[in-house]
Image (tube, grey):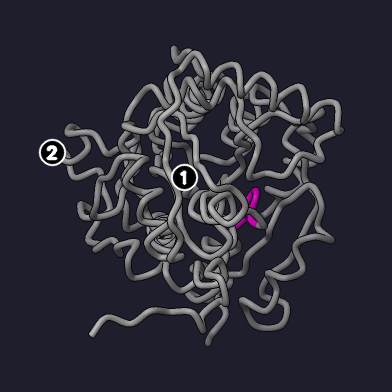
Amino acid sequence: MRQSPKLVTVFGGSGFLGRHVVRALAKRGYRVRVAVRRPDLGFFLQPLGVVGQIQLVQANLRYPDTVRRALDRADAVVNCVGILSESGRQSFGPVQAEGARVIAEGTPAGLPLVQVSAIGADPNSASAYARTKGQGDAAVLAARPDAVIVRPSVLFGQGDSFFNRFAALARALPILPIAGAETRFQPVWAGDVGEAIALAVDGRVLGGRIYEFGGPEIRTLRELVEYVLQVTERKRMIIAMPEGLARIQARVMEIVDALSFGLLPDELKLTRDQLVLLRQDNVVSEGARAEARTLEGIGMTPRAMEAIVPAYLTRFRKTGQFDLKRAA
């Protein structure tokens, strides 16, 4: 593989989606600078490229000087930074709104810039997560009108926090109470989103647009949990919680998490802000489909979850992959 002289800075490159972006860029031969808060926790990325191709640097979006250093001499920029819940000094506003603005304003005009957002991002949303994502997108387009905004639905893949979460709960609990049981999702493989972002860096995706990425299937949350039970071969009762009861549970979990200094297992964490998100479907809009602002619109065929998910959920079966029941 011939190494390209072009350097791409990927903020949040050690995160779940970020590692797929780094892999896709490295396969193309780009030199990749991964800007993260803890470079020592990102060394696992280096085998994704050849020796010296992937470099880790320290950067924190709350400190503009570190962002500027990470942007120095970059030929393209990708911002994958995002948090699902607030913890300590990591809060939605500084990370997702202000941080996105600092990156966009620090990226010279003409360089490819990709901002990773989420379906449902809206500056006027009642959810702090969606509101700050929307504010970040608006700030990016104000500073760089030619930027590419990517809004995926829920991501899946090895190590995801969606299917793995429900599989872990099904292994531990006899009953699965879920909020937003009828909310619809369009799960998309993180590898497809990473490839799409690499295409944008290549200059093969039209800038100045907001893209919405989803997989080939739309299912309710209840149906997705039922699919997890099917793959892991477990029988559990699924109970749809009323929103009022779910808010009480979320408040209790927030208090427990705070009192335990963040030691509450991720599988049990639920916030009131996440409940607000569950009020709306998380699927690609008709407008995005009509204007070809989708994976299919940029020439990709998204992979179905059935082709990916079973491979990494086998560990949740009673005896792992050795417990697979085969139909005649």
Image height check: is 206 above or below 32?
A: above
Q: Amino acid at mark 1?
A: Gly
Find residue 7 and report its image quarter. Answer: bottom right
Return the x and y of residue 151 as percentages of the image width and height: 40, 40
In this picture, residue 222 sits left or right of residue 300: right
Q: Is residue 297 magenta?
A: no
Observer-nearest of 250 and 282: 250
Residue segment shown in magenta: 8-13
User: Residue 290 — which label?
Assistant: 2
Observer-nearest of 304 and 40: 304
Q: Amino acid at mark 2?
A: Ala
In this picture, residue 56 sits left or right of residue 287: right
User: Residue 37 — which label?
Assistant: none
Question: CA separation, marks 2 and 1?
Answer: 28 Å
Return the x and y of residue 277 as percentages of the image width and height: 45, 25
Label 1 crowd bin: few (<14), some (14–19), many (20+), radius 10 Å: few
| Residue 148 visible to an observer of this rendering | no
User: Residue sitting at 57 percent across and 35 percent down?
Assistant: 104
